[in-house]
Image (spheres, rainbow, N blue to C red):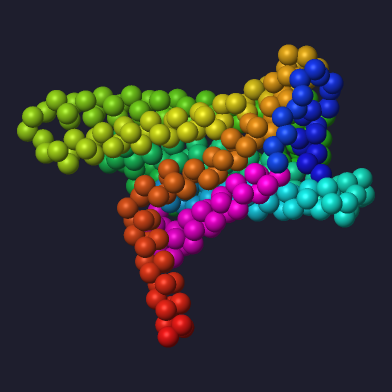
Amino acid sequence: MNSSTEALSTHPTDCAEVQVPNQVFMAIAVASLSENILVIVAVIKNRNLHSPMYCFICNLAVFNTISSLFKALENILLLFKEAGHLNSLRLFELNIDDIMDSLLCMCFLGSIFSILTIAVDRYISIFHALRYHTLMTMRRVVVMLSTIWVLCGTSGVLMIGFFEAATVKIFFVVPFFTALLFILLLYVHMFLLARHHANRIASMPGLHARQRQSGLRGALTLTILIGVFVACWAPFCPHLLIMMICPENPYCECYRSLFQLHVVLLVSHAVTDPAIYAFRSTELRNTYKKMFLCSASRIFKECV
């Protein structure tokens, strides 16, 4: 099992590979699964959340849910393998492993494209507010989401089925870094404008404190988005370049020995996504409160 990890660590090196216990991945997967399912249920139940922005947030939560589910399943199978109940060389186990790795690659790429759509949506809603409903129609949202799923599904299958082919690696890596670059450019641009706007508001003596706090809150939110995104994704990105440029270089191999540690940071982003994109939304927080209050009242009635 875990062939995708092994494929990135097949060459000998003097640097010992850092091993992360399967229980750590399991705990992150369960936390991510719980949070993202909560987001999906909240968006489906509340008609006020049936808008382009929340469609993109829900799409990201779906990718995170699938990746968390199969990451948890993969770790369960690894625990069975360590206990001697599975043989990783059997055809059935190899096929299951390939399917899970394909889905994980699909979700990995799908998450980055979902974050890109959220960034684009935020940019249009902030800086082209008057044209937002004209530019971001539900029809265009469906086309964007369908394109993401087709592209990511195809990339996931090709990446696992033809991993050694340079063309397939390029087909996987180039869209990833293109999306990554656009996300960083959009967020940095939005952050600079938001900070400038917050400074202007703060310098105007006639404005109320609430208006000042709103401007500062917007800049703070974008700062958190950029900081967490870079912290979780930046350490993993060089692995994709190493895979193509210097797969047998000893210095590159030393960096690849940290692969599992960097994957922990990467999958942790699926836990922070709901907190950043969803939990800071007043409408979503109110939906969560209603959901929990309804559940609590039903349990109370059943107990009585």
29 above or below 115? below
Horizontal side of residue 18 vs 119, given as left or right: right
- The quarter holding residue 34 reads bottom right
The answer to which of 214 and 30 lies nearer the viewer is 30
Q: Quadrant of the N terminus?
A: top right
Range of magenta residues: 22-51
Q: Is residue 150 magenta?
A: no
Image position, residue 83 (x, y; %) = 84, 51
Image point 50% across, 39% down: which residue?
A: 115
Horizontal side of residue 111 vs 279, given as left or right: right
Image position, residue 167 (x, y; %) = 76, 27
Label the magenta part by its dominant secondary structure.
Answer: helix
The answer to whether residue 182 of the structure is visible from this angle is: no
The answer to which of 136 and 176 lies nearer the viewer is 176
Image point 42% across, 79% down: which residue?
A: 300
Horizontal side of residue 7 vs 178, given as left or right: right
53 above or below 185? below
Image position, residue 151 (x, y; %) = 64, 41
Q: Is residue 46 magenta?
A: yes
Horizontal side of residue 120 vs 209, given as left or right: right
282 above or below 292? above
Image position, residue 270 (x, y; %) = 55, 44
Image point 14% across, 38% down: which residue?
A: 209
Q: Residue furthest right?
A: 90
